[in-house]
Amino acid sequence: MKLKIILQIAWGLLKARKRQTIVAAVGVTFGITTFITLLGFMNGLNDLLDGLMMNRTPHIRLYNEITPSSTQPIDEASNHNDDYNFVHSIKPKNDRMEIRNNKPIISFLSNAPEVKGVTTRITSQVFFNIGASSIGGLINGIEVAQEKELFFFEDYMIEGNSMDLQNVPNSIVLGEILAEKLMLRIGDLVQVTAPNGERFQLKLVGLFQTGIADIDKSQSYASILTTQKILNRPNDYVTDILVKLHDVKRAPALAKYYGKLFSVETIDMNTANAQFDTGSSIRSLISYAVGITLLVIAGFGIYNILNMLIYEKMDSIAILKATGFSGQDVSRIFNTIALVIGIAGGGLGLLFGNLLCHLIHSIPFNTDALPTIKTYPIDFSTKYYVIAALFSVITTYFAGYFPSRKASKVDPVAIIRGK
């Protein structure tokens, strides 16, 4: 019964200060709307940028690095054990870039339970010839089917079909910017000079665009068999083994393990993209900081309104306490007012935030750098709405807690005597 009366009194006080109540609720609504929109847009942008980089990046890359030997013959001589040996201008051995015994390594990785997929690649410097001039670039020999499945290669094709690399002999796919430099179109022949000086003619069967200019103006793709032919290498020649894991968080530890196990160089995705990942984390942190700041400001608005309401309603509070309401009952009245403002404002904020996110997501976003993106990116993750709802209730509760404590301590005798 008392709870019903407390709710009726709280509702009466809210209606008595309609303008201030609406202003406080609008402040919460604005804070929640901005929080959801900002987090959704910034994290949608992060996901877009991460996808551009991470989709094309293996979780673990195995390769052979040509480096000078850390142990020189003089270090093995027993009569020099107590000496310090200084050897200058050390040159690496006449090693090749290929990964030796790659088939057993691929078989082991393919059967490992933590591995989602494995593919091989050949990477080499080449020259693309246009008349008497040459443009330096990279050719990537790939297993087309695995590249499509693991690295979404088809998603970056803007002309042609990636499977033509496998079905059409001596074919190649160029980055769009590189094709423009070479003044080539689909079906034209591409003159490619290998590092050994041999020149090959390849048929252009497609164009790709990643949105990263440094890649699009220098890189090309061919089948792994075509690339082996260009480089005059045997059929088991590969320079990279690329691994995708079920759990990317295990990449750093597994990269070290595979490096020791197979005696090859390894690099995990986190290390390869450390600067990029840091930028995404900072953008997310800024978004959370701005959104939470707006909610805190809205909380201060509620705090000020309730403070003013207490000063204006001192007579009413004194009468309530004089008629048998305890200090705790009075505190509950003002806490109820704060929570009603928070829940109402927060609910509207969740609604308007979702509507604004859908509105932004429907705005056309056309750019030559990102042909696969048609609208502005938005992340509609449920966690942003849960965080916003919880924070709006918590903020408004504490905004009403301190004024309600002040109201509970009002001495009715002092107030009535003063009147």
Image (spheres, rainbow, N blue to C red):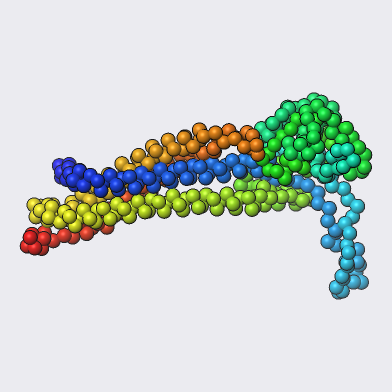
Any part of residue 365 in sight = yes
Instruction: Check the image and report above or below for 326 versus 125.
Output: below
Q: Nearer the viewer, residue 142 or 74?
A: 142
Residue located 42% across and 51% down the image: 292
Q: Percent from the top left, x then y, of residue 323?
A: 8, 52
- Image coordinates for residue 125, horizontal then vertical, percent: 83, 44
Which quarter of the figure is the C terminus placed in?
bottom left
Q: Residue at x 62, y 37 (%)?
A: 367
The image shows a total of numbered marks equal to: 0
Horizontal and vertical percent for residue 34? 42, 45
Q: Report whether residue 192 is seen.
A: no
Q: Which residue lies at the image location 33% right of the left edge and 52% below the top edge?
A: 299
- Residue 1: image quadrant is top left
Give the side of residue 100 with respect to residue 411, left or right. right
Give the x, y percent position of residue 213: 70, 43
Q: Is residue 191 left or right of residue 332?
A: right
In the image, residue 137 sits, relative to residue 185, either above or below, namely: below
Residue sitting nearer the eye, 173 or 369: 369
Q: Is residue 183 left or right of residue 366?
A: right
Q: Residue at x 25, y 50 (%)?
A: 335
